[in-house]
Image (tube, rainbow, N blue to C red):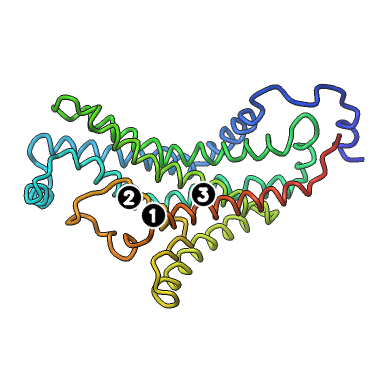
Amino acid sequence: MGVDRASYRAWEGRARPTRGVAFAIAGAMIRRLMRLKLVKILSLSVPGGACLLAGGFFLLWQQGKGAPWLEEVLAEGGLSRSVLLPIMNRFFQVSVGFFAILLAALTGAPLIAEDRRSGSLPLYFSRPITHLDYVAGKMLTVGWFLSLLLILPPVLLYLLELGFSSEEGVAVAQFPVLLRSLVPSVALVVVLSAMSLGVSSLTKKSSHAVLLFFGLCIGAGIASEILVREVFENPSFYAVSPFRSVRRIAIEMLPIPRQLDREVGVLGEMPFSAAWTGLALWTGGSLALLALRIRRVEVVT
C-alpha cells in the first residue's frame, strides 16, 4: 500500500490548509533551486552586472564623457538626458531575452516533471493541499527567479537615474518610465512561467522538459518569422512568438528616438492588440494544459 493510502486516508483534520501554503511550497522550491550555481548566476549576477554597467554609463555621462554619437543624436533631436532611462530599459529588454529563456528552463521546466517521475503528486494533492495550491506554488517559484532577472533591474535603473541626476523633480518625472518598463517585464515573467510549467507537465524527465521548452521557444520564433515573411506577409503573425510580442509591447511602452530604434521595422508594424492577444493565448493555453494534466492525478481524501 502506498504512503498516500496508508497515511493520508487516515488523516482527520481541516479540509483546507492554513493560509499561505502556496508560499510555503514556493519557499521550499526556491531554497532548493538556489543551490544550483547556474541559477544563482543568471538570477543575481546577470541583472547585477547590467546595473553596474548602467551605473558606470551614468557616471561617465555625468562627467561629460558619455558616448559622443549618442550626444549628437540627442542634440540633433532636441532631446534631454531624460530619454536615457527608456533607452537603457529597451536595450535591457532585447539583450536579456536568451537569459530569461535559460532561467525559465532551469527553474520551471523540471518542477513538475520531477514530481511526476518520483510519484509524489498524489502526496502533494492529498489533504489539505489542493491542485490550486500546488500550481500557485510552482508559478510563484518560477516567477520569483524571473522577477530577479526581469523586474528588479528596471527598478534599479530607475534608482540609479535618481542617484546620478542633478535635476529637480526627476523622481516624479521618470516614475512613469519605470511603470512602463515594468509592463513588458511582468508580461514576460507570466508567459514564461506558464509555458515552462505547461511543458514540464508533459514529461517525467527534467532533461526532456528542458529540451522541449527550448524547442518550443525556438520553434515559435522561427514559425512567426516564416508566417510573416513567406506565407501571409502580415506583421500580426509575429504574435505566434511570445518573445516578439513582448518586444512589440516594449516598443509601445518605451518609445525612444527613431535614430536609436533598430527594432521599429516590420515588428513595429505589428498591431499592439495582436501582441497582447498572442501573450494571452500562450499563457491561457499553457495553464489549460497544466490544469488538464494535473487534474488527472487522483486526490486522496
Q: How much space separates mark 2 and mark 3, taking CA atoms?
A: 20 Å
Reading the chain from its start, which is encountered first: label 2 or label 3? Answer: 3
Q: Position of residue 148 (x, y in %)?
A: 43, 37
Q: Which residue is mark 1?
A: 272
Q: Which mark is residue 169?
A: none
Q: How much space separates mark 1 and mark 2, taking CA atoms?
A: 8 Å
What residue is drawn where x is 34% and y is 52%?
A: 95
Label 3 Cα crowd, 10 Å radius (few <14 / some 14-19 / many 20+): many
Above or below residue 245? Residue 162 is: above
Reading the chain from its start, which is encountered first: label 1 or label 2? Answer: 2
* Towards the viewer: 225 or 202: 225
Label 1 Cα crowd, 10 Å radius (few <14 / some 14-19 / many 20+): some
Circles 1 and 2, Cβ within 8 Å, touching? The answer is yes
The kind of secondary structure element at disc 1 is helix
Q: Which mark is residue 252?
A: 2
Q: What's under tag 1, amino acid-wise? A: Phe
Q: Position of residue 270 (x, y in %)?
A: 37, 61
Q: Which residue is mark 3?
A: 192
Q: Position of residue 285 (x, y in %)?
A: 60, 54
Q: Position of residue 144 (x, y in %)?
A: 51, 36
Q: How much space separates mark 3 and mark 1, taking CA atoms?
A: 20 Å
In which quadrant will I find the N terminus?
top right
The kind of secondary structure element at disc 3 is helix
In which quadrant will I find the C terminus?
top right
The kind of secondary structure element at disc 2 is helix
Mark 2 vs mark 3, foreground winner is 2
Occupied quadrant, residue 174: top left
Above or below residue 69? Residue 131 is: above
Q: What's under tag 3, amino acid-wise? A: Leu
* Towards the viewer: 241 or 1: 241
What residue is drawn where x is 29% and y is 31%?
A: 175
What residue is drawn where x is 45% and y is 66%?
A: 237
